[in-house]
Amino acid sequence: MHPSLTALRPALRTVGGLALAGGAGVTWSLVEARWYALREVTVPVLPAGQAPLRVLHVSDLHLTPGQRRKVDWVRDLATLDPHLVVDTGDNWAHRDSMPALLRALEPLLALPGAFVLGSNDYVAPMPKNPARYLLPDARRAPARPPVELPWRELVARLTSAGWTDLSNRRDALEVDGRRLSLVGTDDAHLEQDRFPAAGGPDDARARSDRRDAPDIDLHVGVTHAPYRRVLDAMHADGVDLMIAGHTHGGQLTVPLWGALTTNCDLDTGRAKGLHGWPGARPDRAGGAGSAWLHVSAGLGTSPYAPVRFACRPEATLLTLVAA
């Protein structure tokens, strides 16, 4: 072998090793994107003496036609027998996904539920340079008009099944003998969020329902994208538990480090899981005055980036217990 090639041999081995590792990582990320996980989390937030309340949080399905395994997995969540289902949006990613989505949600729609919409409920995703997600704000004007999805029909289907639309609205529900007040916003990523004033026109049904009802047991905030302005408004409103999605948990995370981005102005330390807002968790030092915040890593991805790494797709069963 030529001496110059001999000298290059260590470098060639390194490059080859990196290429193999990179290929293995890409292969695994494609597999992990379909390795759905059920997370179970206990939240000590109910009034003293109350029995547990099970809340199923589903988010970011980004469903496309043909994803039968995801449809079957979501349908099976009904066997958990939750008292309430909360859907935080981005349900689909294709204009022809309505039949698949309705099949996925069918058993859950028989249960009490509440929902808000995300950006990809309104418009189909478009190709985007993944490196943009590392910028402080990944949004940009699209090069061509986005494809509008049949979101009005989606809202009509969900509400006709009995689920409560919380897009810039307030409402109240009785769930397993408990009285819940709910407040939600439309998608903050599209800047369609308008936090509804208490006692305003969007609060009419809740106020009417409360007149002869016992005191509210829990005040819950629901949003798709957990922008700080939305969480601050919910905290100021006295929300006990905030529920959000959108972040995909970072989607591609670094082991032992965590998420690199949340695709909003939420810090990466809260990219997924149970936290406190604005401070530490209420059950930990420094958490006095904080509310509970749960952010779902979601069940899907954009069809243009169908990968996850160290961040499995998930739904979460929140078991609310007495504080």
Image (tube, rainbow, N blue to C red):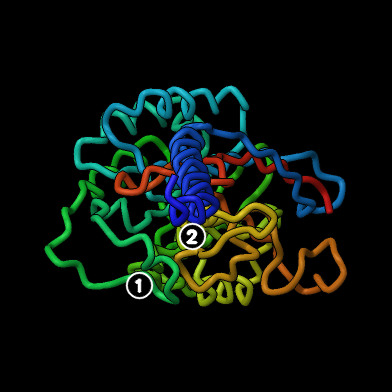
Quadrant of res 84? top right
- Above or below: residue 113 compared with residue 261: above
Q: Which of these two is toward me, 267 or 116?
A: 267
Q: Quadrant of the C terminus?
A: bottom right
Q: Which of these two is toward me, 47 or 190?
A: 190
**Residue found at x 50% / y 37%:** 28
Query: x and y percent of residue 124 in the render?
Result: 24, 51
Q: Are marks 1 and 2 in contact (CB under 8 Å)?
A: no
Q: Which of these two is toward me, 251 or 276?
A: 251
- Above or below: residue 54 compared with residue 48: above
Query: x and y percent of residue 112 in the render?
Result: 52, 37
Quadrant of res 210? bottom right
- Name the residue beneath numbered marker 2: 223
Q: Residues within 10 Å of mark 2 (few under 14, many from 20)?
A: many
**Kind of residue indicated by mark 2:** Thr
Classify mark 1: helix, strand or loop: loop
Task: From the viewer's perspective, tell me whether residue 60 is left or right of residue 216.
Answer: left
Comes first in the chain, label 1 or label 2: 1
**Kind of residue indicated by mark 1:** Glu
- Name the residue beneath numbered marker 1: 191
Task: From the viewer's perspective, tell me whether residue 243 is left or right of residue 264.
Answer: right
Quadrant of res 314? top right
Classify mark 2: helix, strand or loop: loop
- Above or below: residue 23 compared with residue 212: above
